[in-house]
Image (tube, grey):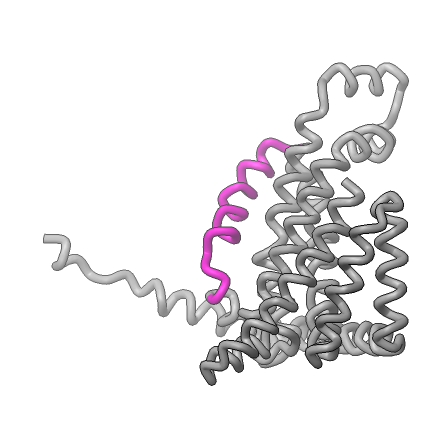
Amino acid sequence: MLDNLPRLPVAQWASDFVDWLTSSFSFVFDPVKEFLEGLMEWIIQILEFFPPTLFIIIVMALAFIFMKNKILSPILIGVGLLFIYNQGLWANLIDTMTLVIISGLISVILGIPLGILMSKSTGFETVMKPILDFMQTMPAFVYLIPAVAFFGIGMVPGVFASVIFSAPPTIRLTNLGIRQISAELIEASDSFGTTPMQKLIKVQLPLASSSIMAGVNQTIMLALSMVVIASMIGAPGLGTEVLSSLQRAQVGTGFVAGLGIVILAIIIDRFTQSKK
């Protein structure tokens, strides 16, 4: 009986919608693409300005400061970066770091205000929850299709797909962190005559900072996890080496590139965890 039901043309609707967006908002997508390409080239130039040895020393020094003067973590970070340099993957590392920096930064800039709005409005939270569920459960590969339609091939569509895939943790945990602040503390701040903005900046955000940083950490890690997928649409970086090794069945080369991604993930995780 169900076989006789007409098939809904959902695929055609989705295709038509993307085509409409591409044609109707090209005046938005083109400047955004040019801006992001320029920004990424600028970041790459800054990162490549430092010789690899000096760059590693700077990262180790920052790790020593951020990680409360622990000596082991900076040493391990230095060893990991030296390994990546030794394997001839330094240029790929710079490209990957640029992709993660841009996509992570955009995700956080968008995610924290949206999380704040969700914490202030139950109605907005009700609307956002299914959207966030959709963003997190949709396979990441699917995001590459509209990304290519909007921005073509390269690093920009990789950033677009990464932002959609990685933004939900920051949004959710910002909302959760603010909502979990005890009512007594909120009442105490109200009794001192604080304005809503003062209460947000001086009370709610500081108290929710641990939860917010956990969301930022997860967002950055998810953005990094997209580097291999983004390489399928021309985004350069360590993911390109993994994809190339997969296509050529080069186990060793793929393992080394994958290990480079793991090292970068651990470094980023240690830095973001240190400020929680």
Residue nearer the viewer, 126 or 253: 253
Q: Is residue 131 magenta?
A: yes
Locate residue 273, reporting x and y percent. 74, 45
Q: Is residue 103 magenta?
A: no
Residue nearer the viewer, 245 or 82: 82
Locate residue 75, reporting x and y percent. 81, 58
User: What span is in magenta?
Assistant: 120-141
Task: Give me the residue at 43% from left, 71% from top.
Answer: 16
Question: Seen from this angle, which residue lies furthest left?
Answer: 1
The answer, for residue 232, to whether it is visible in the render is no
In the image, is residue 126 above or below residue 74? above
Residue nearer the viewer, 83 or 137: 83
Q: Is residue 269 left or right of residue 10?
A: right
Locate residue 85, reporting x and y percent. 75, 75
Position of the C terminus, as image quadrant, is top right
Task: Give me the residue at 66% from left, 73% from top.
Answer: 156
The answer, for residue 275, to whether it is visible in the render is yes
Residue nearer the viewer, 132 or 193: 132
Task: Give me the residue at 36% from left, 69% from top.
Answer: 12
Q: Is residue 12 left or right of residue 97?
A: left
